[in-house]
Structures are given as C-alpha cells and as structure tokens.
Amino acid sequence: MQIRSPFNILFILALCFPPILANANNHDFSNPTQNHDTEATYLEYRSTSSNRFLEELDRQDDFAAAPYKVSLFNPTNGEDSERLWSQTKSIGFYGLGVAGALALMPESITNWEKDDVQLMNQWWDNVRQGPVWDRDAWVINYIGHPYFGGVYYQAARKSGYRQWDAFVYSALMSTFYWEYGIEAFAEIPSIQDLVVTPTLGWVYGEWAFQKERQIRLGGGTVMGSQAIGSTALFFLDPVDSIGRGVNNMAGKELVKAGTGYMGIHSNVLRNGDVETQYRVQLNYAFGAGDTADGLKLRQPKSYSDITGDPVTYGIVGLSLGTHYPVLDKDRHLKSDFAPSFTLGLYFTEHFSTRLSYMRGEYESLVETRTHTYENYSLDFQYYLNASSRLKPYINAGLGEAMLDMDRSNKKLQVNVGTGLHYSLNSNWSMMLDWRYAHHRNSGARDHLIGSQVIYRFGEGNKLI
C-alpha cells in the first residue's frame, strides 16, 4: 500500500494532539474564570476566538454589481487576511512535517525516492506528464478530496471571506499546494482532483461551516455527548483544531486559530412569555428566566439574504445520465449506451462550464472481446433564450478519449456541440445534448448523444 492520500496527513496530525485538541474544542471562550490546568501538560495560555464571517462584517462592495470579483488578495470588506495567511502557513507546515515523516518510511510504502535529486526529478516528471484521469478509488476521489477541499474552504470562509473567495482559495490550495505540490512527488496530477476538490469542497465546506456553528451554539455536544461533539468539531475543521492544539502546547499564539459565534435564541418562559437570549461564544447566555423545555434556535436568514451576495454554492451542479457514442468506424467497436456524469459551475443564465465523463464496455467488430472506451472533457456552454425554462445552448471545449484505460493511446480532442436545457425548478433540470469530438492526431471523429438530470445544490437557480 502506498501513502498518497491526504487522509494520512489528517490522521497523523490527529494522533499527535488528541488531548490538546479536545481541550481546545471544549473551551468556553466566553467564561473569563475558566483557566487551563497549569499543573497539567498545558502552559498558561487561554484559547481565543479568531474567526469572523462575512454575515457580521460592514461590507463595502456591491456584490451584485461584480458578482465574480475576487477579493482574496485585496480584502475590502473587513476580511482577516492575517488569519488566512497564518492558517495557510500552518497547512504548509503540517504538510512538510508529514512529508518528513513519510521520508523516513520505506520507499515500498510511500513510493517516494530518498535521494533529493531523484525526488525532484520524479516531481518534474509527474508534473510535465499531467494532468491525467487517475484511477484512485472512488472514496478517495469523490469523498476524500471534497472533504479536504472543504477544509481549505473553511480557512478562508472563517476569516471573513465570501463564498466565492473561499472557493477560489480552495482551488488555489488544492492545485498548487497539493496536486502540483506535495502529491506530485508521488503521482501525476489528476484531472478530476483539480476540479472535484474545490467544487464539491465548496458544497461540503459550506455545510461544515454551518454545522460547526450549529454545534457550538448548542453547547458543543452531539446527541448529548461532549466527546462526540469534540470529535465532530475536530473533523469539521481539523486545521483550526490543530492550530488551537499547537497554541496550547506552545503556551502562546503561534497560529491564528479558534472559533466562536454569537447566537440568538428564543425561549418560552413558564408564564408563556417569550424571552430572547444572546448566546455568546458557545456556552454563556445573557438573560434570566426559568425556561420551559425545548430550547429552540431561531433560524437565521440565508447567507445571500444577509450579504446581498448572489454567488453561493447553489451555482454548483451535478448531473447523472447516459450517453450513446456513435464511434468512428476505424475504432471497429459496436456503439451502445454508457453511464455518464458532469460536474459544473452555472455562473449566470448565459454561461456555465462542466467537466464531463463517460465510460462504457463495447464489443469489438473484428475480434471476440470487449474494449473500454472513455471520453472526458472540460466544456463551456452559452445559453440562448436565457430567461426561459427551456434554453438551447452551444457547447465547446477540449478533452481526451482513451481505450482500455491505457494512457499511451489517449488522444486529445476538440469538442463542439449543442443541446437543450430545461429547468424543472430551482434545483432540478434536464438536459439533452450532442457533442462532436474531433481527435487531432488520429483524425477519429466520435459523436456523443445523451440525456442527463442535473441537480443544483443549496438554493440552486434563484431566478427560477
């Protein structure tokens, strides 16, 4: 087994700090009388809350006027760039630490060269060969990578950046820190990882951001258990949790870390009156009164309602369906249906981009065997009649086709095509499409005809 997954970084770090992380997660930031046990392994240091989020900041930008403006390197709305830079450095430090640990392990386990020159040569060889469609297990590609994309996302989101900026940060980290950084020492950068990590990481990261807030405002417990709550809080944002652990171990703030929130709760008193309590930084509530059972959290307005930001993870769309490839006659393969999927960003009513993939087993017309045919591409769509539920569109992009999962015979292709997109509601839509794929080197010409069902996450298309 080779150690190449980002899961290993998380688990190795988790083993390093378990008691410290638990203490950091359970700390009541609002209680001035709470102190760490100075006779224990902790130094005299009290964790503080370092996070902020856009919903509470005084915003200067009109997001509707420039919805895809990137403020990551020029914050103008009170974002905490120092916190984000601190967390970025900590992520890099943790990665180097784990890389050092892996360097001490046998090459048969890590697949890493021990010689520095050979290691750099291996990195360069992998970088110049990529990106490719990788063959990692689906749990790594479609659960593990989105999870870590969400971890990167939260570092920016909890530093006060809007969702779009947090997505851009996640894309930069997953591309340059991981795919073309640490992981490139072990394997060739992956096409689907470059797209899936930040895109589905946006969806997961925003869910984790809101879930952590809910747990902390509820006292830090899950199913009535503080232990389960602490474990959940660690895995929802391991970078922040490890940062607090490092600070506790050092006895001073080395990393800007720590998470807290203010919550507004409505309580029904025994006399029937309703009292509003302000729950500050996890555990401490202002407001007296003997409350009835069933404390209920007042549901906040949505992110876009509060901030006026039209760009949320609702622009992310995932589709499943089937395609029928009419293959070039020189392939000598019998055409048949095959499953397909896309992952896309639906930027406006006029523009979107999608990563598409299909794979099928096809009978040979000249021998008694079957061949695996794969086709994947990154395409851009322009929609006509954008204000209507039924929108024709044109499609163009680049991709590759491959037989028998053999990278040596993959061929670069240029795609053009057209299709129809019908919106059922804000989240669900249907698509019919035709793509013509011309392969530059071989001259092969394939036609892909298909239909898919698309799901938009979150609020989906708010204009429907």
Image: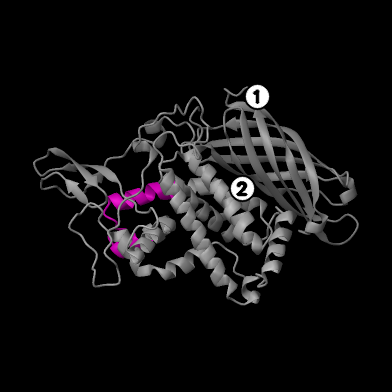
Which residue is denoted by mark 1 in the rendering? 384
Q: Residue at x 42, y 70 (%)?
A: 16
Of circles 1 and 2, the one toward us is 2
Q: Residue at x 65, y 75 (%)?
A: 107
311 or 90: nearer the viewer: 90
User: Where residue 381 sits in the image (x, y, percent)?
Assistant: 66, 33
User: What's drawn in magenta, residue-wise?
Assistant: 206-231
Dot 1 lies on which element?
A: loop
Q: Which residue appears farthest toward the left when viewing the image? A: 271
For the N terminus, the image quarter is bottom right
Which residue is denoted by mark 2 in the rendering? 195
- Specify whether residue 226 is painted magenta: yes
User: Where residue 324 sits in the image (x, y, percent)?
Assistant: 75, 44
Q: Residue at x 46, y 29 (%)?
A: 63
Q: Quadrant of residue 15?
A: bottom left
For residue 279, above or below residue 315: below
For residue 133, above or below residue 461: below
User: Where residue 339 sits in the image (x, y, percent)?
Assistant: 68, 49
Q: Residues within 10 Å of mark 1 (few under 14, many from 20)?
A: some
Dot 2 lies on which element?
A: helix
Relative placement, left or right, of 150 versus 453 is left
Marks 1 and 2 in Cβ contact (< 8 Å) = no
Say what amino acid the circle numbered 1 marks: Leu
Q: Quadrant of residue 419?
A: top right
- Magenta span dominant secondary structure: helix
User: Where residue 328 sits in the image (x, y, percent)?
Assistant: 86, 45
Q: Residue at x 41, y 29 (%)?
A: 308
For residue 186, above or below residue 146: below
The reply to whether residue 223 is visible in this rendering is no
Relative placement, left or right, of 257 versus 121 is left
Say what amino acid the circle numbered 2 marks: Val
Q: Earlier in the sequence, mark 1 or mark 2?
A: 2
